[in-house]
Image: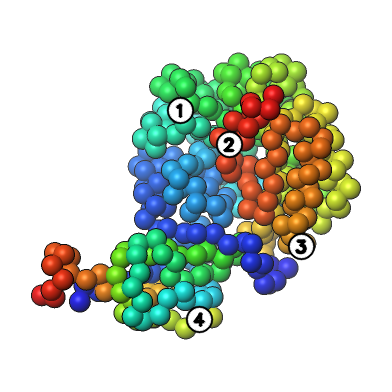
Amino acid sequence: MNKMYINMPHLSAKSSKGTLCVYRVKPGDKIKKGDIVAEIETDKVVSEIESEYDGIIDSLCREEGDEVSEGEALLSLDKGNPSGNGKQK
Amino acid sequence: MTDQKKPSWLRVKYNKSEVSEISEMMSALGLNTVCKEAECPNMGECFKKRTATFMILGKYCTRDCRFCSVEHGAPESVCPEEPEHIAEAAVKLGLRHVVITSVTRDDLPDGGAEQFAACVRSIKRRLPSVAVELLIPDFKGSNNALDIVIAAHPDVIGHNVETVPSLYSDVRPQAVYTRSLEVLKYIKSKSPDIRVKSGIMVGLGEKKEEVFTLFDDLRAAGCDIITIGQYLRPSVSHVEMKEYITPEMFEMYKTQAQSRGFGYVSCGPLVRSSYHAAEALRETDVHS
């Protein structure tokens, strides 16, 4: 498994925290770069967080409604074999 | 009121890698963006499209407007390389329309007007076909400062009245509504071919009749383009947001503004001064 994490991004210069409103994916979902994986509410808006990678969702790291801080993992995903031959090393 | 549940229309997309790329480029050139400093909710969308609004003359504002999240503090020295750095960033980003604003610099004799003008000249020298839009402070009403900016001949000069006059003491205590109108009027009278732009926030407790009067005031001052967006309170220490304005109400404001003859009306919950600025200029030119 080529495990990667999607973390709480830097959404606000004045606050490093936000509320994880909802996950838009579940373990086992196949996603593409740019797909929305979660919604985070900060002081001004709700941000739809896009995935930076293609892959398959491995696990959700937090509960919906949790307060999350910048840099904390929101979820992990399996990017597959980086060599592209589909085999795990 | 910030504890209110956010309405469904206050939703934005965020792509970390796109935002990081632009942020890192700006940092490397020692540049600031108002997108970041004012915590603009559209930063993700705009950075993804490789557009940004440069904020010159430092990160610290000499005024302390109660709606704004740009930091108030001791001003920094003016960077003589800043205009060239902005032109360089505009080249790297492939911008066709550059928007530049600043912190308010009441400490400088010209309020920073010469730095604005130098930025216009630098960009026009390297990118002659690129449109340059300035969003200026009121320069304390100094016509000399305005003359410096006008002489550089940007395509658009914006100055935001921000809200209706009855709310100035709470929202913008160091500014004067009529002085802001005079700034717009002076620009238009001195250079009718420069597009004049202004913007307001709604949701601060203004009455709609006051907004209509403000539209009339802006048109009388020669304003061509208006932006109208929802005020979003940056923190509990900022002026309170009174209400979320519905998309239907924004449509009503848009219709009212259009009926008064603005060349372009940008109106919606997430509209900000420079949101879709290139489109605003294009449409204004088409309809003029």
Residue A15, given in percent of the width and then of the height, sits at 53, 64
Placement of B104 over or under B172, stated as above or below = above
Residue B3 drawn at (x, y percent): 68, 72
Q: Which residue is mark 3?
A: B243
Helix, strand or loop status at disc 4: loop
Confirm or deny contact between disc 4 and disc 3 (CB under 8 A): no
Asked if marks 1 and 4 fall on the same chain, the answer is no
The single residue placed furthest to the left in the displayed view is A89
Inter-mark Cα distance, 2 to 4: 39 Å
- The residue that label 4 is drawn on is A64
Q: Nearer the viewer, mark 3 or mark 2?
A: 2
| Crowdedness near tag 1: few (<14), some (14–19) or many (≥20) residues, C-alpha within 10 Å | many
Q: Earlier in the sequence, mark 3 or mark 2?
A: 3
Eyeballing the image, is B66 above or below B90?
A: below
Say which residue label 1 marks. Answer: B83
| Position of residue A25 measured from the top left corner of the image (x, y, whole percent) | 42, 76
Q: Residues within 10 Å of mark 4 (few under 14, many from 20)?
A: some
Q: Are marks 2 and 4 in contact (CB under 8 Å)?
A: no
Q: Chain of mark 4?
A: A
Q: Give amino acid for label 4.
A: Glu
B203 on left or right of A14:
right
Find residue B128 and report its horizontal and vertical position in percent: 45, 20
Residue to which mark 2 is pinned: B279
Are tags 1 and 3 found on a single chain?
Answer: yes
User: Which residue type does callout 1 highlight?
Assistant: Pro
Q: Residue at x 44, y 66 (%)?
A: A36
